[in-house]
Amino acid sequence: MKQKILFLLNGPSRDTALIGTHFENANLDVDYYWAYNNEFPDRLDRYGAVFLSGSPHGAYDDVEFIHKEHDLVRTVASRGLPILGVCYGSQLLASALCGFDQVFRRSSCDVGYHNLSRSNETRNDAIAKDLAPTFPMFVWHNDEVRSDHPDMVILASSENCPNQIWRYKDKKIWGIQGHPEVTKNAAANWFGNRRDRLEKDGVDVDELIFRADNASNSKTLLSNFTKVCRTELPGHG
């Protein structure tokens, strides 16, 4: 039996998001569970990789599904399987693997297109090795992952956030604070569906749509993670 990617949806809808489509277009088998609604698989041995989506929650919230996700991440990590978390997903990884105190509430929302700078650690990193020295990514977060934990390898930072992309030790576990799924083609729908929330956070949504590009570096991160998954999922190599 082919193993699958376990895709945990952490938002208030079952929207499978653009990253799930990316995996499907790469002919990977994806199994979606609405974790936000406390839907989890009853066994993990059918999965060879895990993806954690964003969420309106914080990784520190005292919510049942978040506690379950902490346990699931620790179990999957102990088995050496690839994991990728985006936005809240990155924060959940940090909280589960490096400690609850690794995620903190910012004094203000960090939102917009920011230039990220890669670190020297990207040279030998499986998903970040092809990044440009600097590249734009859309970010939108009130919470943030600290950058000083000894088990974290910082792969990219920005002026407002020293930990935009990180890896856990030398494992196949990565967190991305921004939203690599937001490409030029997807921008109008992605931003439009979140217009009210974005405007409350003080941004011009039409300007965001105008600024959207093809997100080549962001897509490189996802494509390289897909390659990592192919090596772990029998029948996909």
Image (tube, rainbow, N blue to C red):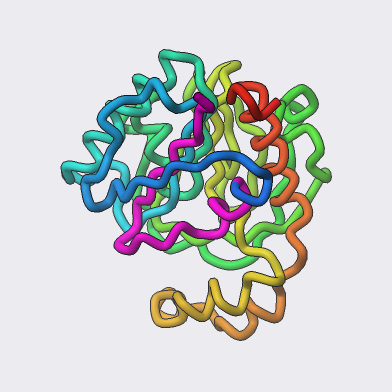
Taking the image as shown, residue 113 lies to the left or right of residue 42, namely right
Q: Quadrant of residue 229?
A: top right
Q: Is residue 57 visible?
A: yes
Taking the image as shown, residue 194 lies to the left or right of residue 57, namely right
Task: Tell me: residue 211, above or below residue 72.
Answer: below
Front position in the image: 99 or 33? 33
Report how many numbered discs are placed on residues in the image: 0
Q: Residue 153, image x and y in percent? A: 60, 25
Residue at left offset 44%, top offset 63%: 109
Residue at left offset 57%, top offset 28%: 167
Task: Tell me: residue 227, above or below residue 1.
Answer: below
Residue at left offset 23%, top offset 52%: 37
Front position in the image: 175 or 8? 8
Task: Tell me: residue 118, above or below residue 184.
Answer: above
Residue at left offset 23%, top offset 34%: 68
Q: Is residue 89 visible?
A: no
Task: Tell me: residue 35, above or below residue 194.
Answer: above
Which quadrant is home to the C terminus? Answer: top right
Residue 17 on the magenta segment: yes
Q: Which residues are magenta?
A: 1-23
Q: Residue 52, image x and y in percent? A: 44, 42
Q: Residue 101, image x and y in percent? A: 32, 33
Q: Quadrant of residue 224?
A: top right
Q: Residue 93, image x and y in percent? A: 42, 33
